[in-house]
Image (cartoon, rainbow, N blue to C red):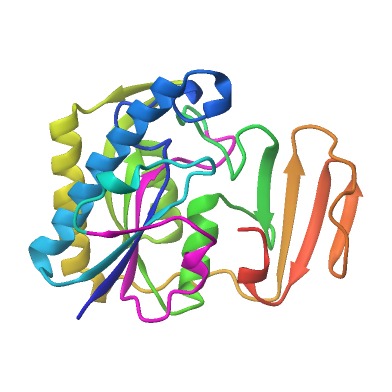
Amino acid sequence: MKSFFILTDLEGPAGVDSFTQTRPGDGYPERVDAAKKLLAREVNACIEGIRSVYPNARIDVWDGHGPGGLFAEDIVGGTYLREGHPYKKLEGYDALLFVGQHAMAGTYNAPLNHTYSSRSVAYYRLNGVLIGEFGARALVAGVQGVPVIFLSGDDKAALEALLFVPEIETAVVKRGLGIEAAEHLDGEEACHAVREGAAESVRRMAEIPPFTGIAAPYTLEIGYLTAVGQSMQGPGVEWINDRTVRISRDDIRDLPV
């Protein structure tokens, strides 16, 4: 039986282009709840695409948005996961798929672009390479021998995915026009693109190698938007200044990615 892991985020679905739709603390909970419904329909389309090729597959769906990006009861045909970082333990999975992904912090005209925190992080640089959530997590999967075969999200996120995994299948559901601006496919078109892209990705997964292009040992430099002090301490941690820290580890899974 084939097994697939779907990693989700809330900034990437069609219809989402404002931080008020993704950050509950901004004071618009009804907008966040509506965005979760938009993400769920694309996740379910991804599940349908996988099952069109492997009807009996095991499919797990991790809610990867910080404050929560899905309602568990909205997921159809997959198992909802929330706690911890299960993508760091992918033994037994055949492939990893991203749904609702955004581009890394600083990407030109990429809607809702950020790297892990939209409020505090300016950039991540891993072994000298600027990297976002896609690249870092693709590498986490890659060192476990698991390929990342699919990404849906905005056009800039798709380009970023192709940079790290040229063979990946992508589904573009919106075109970025700015940090909070995009042209979107309508819901039916977006779900069709995700469904067909996911199906093609699992048909092609033998052609898509795991991403292992950044080798150990790893040094992750995190640049913050404002001074954060030196709260992180310990072996392998070096503060360059009050807005920049470098963390060195032998295993990518031991870094905050």
Q: Quadrant of the C terminus?
A: bottom right
Please determine whether, in this image, residue 30 is positioned above or below residue 95: above
Residue at 73% x, 72% y is 249
Residue at 17% x, 61% y is 50
Q: Residue 179, can we see it? A: no
Q: Nearer the viewer, residue 106 or 41?
A: 41
Q: Quadrant of the N terminus?
A: bottom left
Please determine whether, in this image, residue 101 is positioned above or below residue 215: above
How many numbered marks appear? 0
Residue 124, image x, y percentages = 66, 49
Q: Which residues are magenta?
A: 78-107
**Horizontal side, residue 66 vs residue 249: left or right:** left
Residue 235, image x, y percentages = 87, 70
- Residue 135 lies in the magenta-colored region: no
Image quarter for residue 14?
Answer: top left
Residue 155, image x, y percentages = 35, 37
Residue 130, image x, y percentages = 62, 51
Q: Nearer the viewer, residue 88 or 179?
A: 88
Residue most toward the front? 73
